[in-house]
Image (spheres, grey):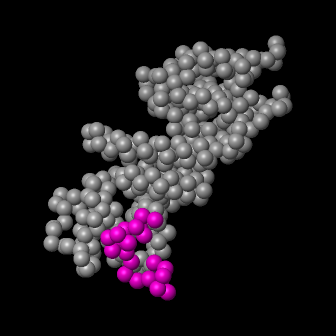
Amino acid sequence: MSRSTAPEDHPTGVPLTTGALARRLGVSPTTLRSWDRRYGIGPAVRADGRHRRWTPRDVAMLEAMCRLTSAGVPPAEAARAAKETAGVPPVTGETSDEPPPQGRSRASGTLPLGDVRQECRGLARAAVRLDSPAVEEQLAAAVRQYGITVAWQEVMVPTLHAVGRKWASSGDRYVEVEHLLSWHVSTALRRGTPPPVAQSDASVAGPVVLACVPGEQHTLPIEALNAALGELRLPTRMFGAAVPAEALAAAVQRLGPSAVVLWAQARSTASLALARHVAGTQWGVKGARRRPLVMLGGPGWSGPQARGLHRPPTLKDAVDVLSDAHTGRHGDEASGERP
């Protein structure tokens, strides 16, 4: 599916509705109406005297407003500067003698997104402003439109990576942006996950077990995988962060899972010994013993891999492998390994 390479994705000169502009800017429609009411930063034309229609000049003014507020400029001050930039005269009673804030028009809060879907830009703007309602709205819309797998790979991950790069290049700044965005991504993933599938038939293949290795706290990727498997109505058991090795081994023995996914963000937490131990776990009657497929997820597992342990490169690949494992279509070969 093609991606937009520029922030503009509507025909030049065609007015936008408030909803369309809100999605583009990564703000809620309520925020746009509030800015119009409080600071006079609204559309120049209203269709039928009521409905707002935003012209290209209005859009440029609102984009400047968003850049300035993202950089920390107070809204009233940002509104004056944005209107001056767009050539809009101040409203009666509003002072415009104060010059625009110096050194802030370049929007230091802008995230380095690169070539991404248009939805990433709106989500990034909302996250930098710490606008929780808009972040939640953007994420929910992405899940509704694309489904979990595409929304994760092409909307959530690029924005999370951009926040991480901004944090890494800015010292301790933007930590709050990453925390807020991560929280809402987790919330969106859980809301998009159907209720667990009941397994009353003992002959049915066991569930997929998802767990972070001991010492590992990064759960978002396996939350996305859990949600994507839920969309396919595949049974899962999510154990979350930093599962002790003994507890993981006991759970595998009790559940008899079709597959086990082990997530490691850092090499310091990845343990091939643990992965091999889980892969060697057997259950069932003599002569019909079964073992789980073991899948390794995360950059912590980079480097030489053990034979028989899969490491698919994308969420979609992981879902395909696990779906085959649950239906009994996978073999013992390490076809999912990376070189």
Q: Is residue 33 above or below residue 185?
A: below
Whether 175 is among the magenta residues is no
Q: Between residue 116 and residue 183, name the one nearer to us.
A: 183
Residue at the (32%, 42%) spot, across then down: 167
Identity of the residue furthest to the bottom in this view: 48
Q: In the rendered image, is residue 78 in sight?
A: yes
Q: Between residue 76 and residue 104, name the one nearer to us.
A: 76
Question: Taking 211 as reference, is 123 left or right?
Answer: left
Residue at the (64%, 20%) spot, across then down: 279
Residue 152 placement (x, y as % from top left): 53, 47
Question: Taking 227 as reference, is 36 left or right?
Answer: left
Residue at the (64%, 44%) spot, across then down: 193
Quadrant in the picture for residue 292: top right
Give the total of numbered labels.
0
Question: Taking 29 as reference, is 258 left or right?
Answer: right
Residue at the (16%, 68%) spot, across then down: 98
Which quadrant holds the N terminus? bottom right
Residue 133 placement (x, y as % from top left): 47, 55
Q: Is residue 5 above or below residue 287?
A: below
Residue 117 placement (x, y as % from top left): 47, 58
Residue 67 placement (x, y as % from top left): 31, 60
Q: Is residue 124 above or below residue 219?
A: below
Q: In the rendered image, is residue 302 in sight?
A: no
Identity of the residue furthest to the top in this view: 286
Residue interval drawn in magenta: 30-52
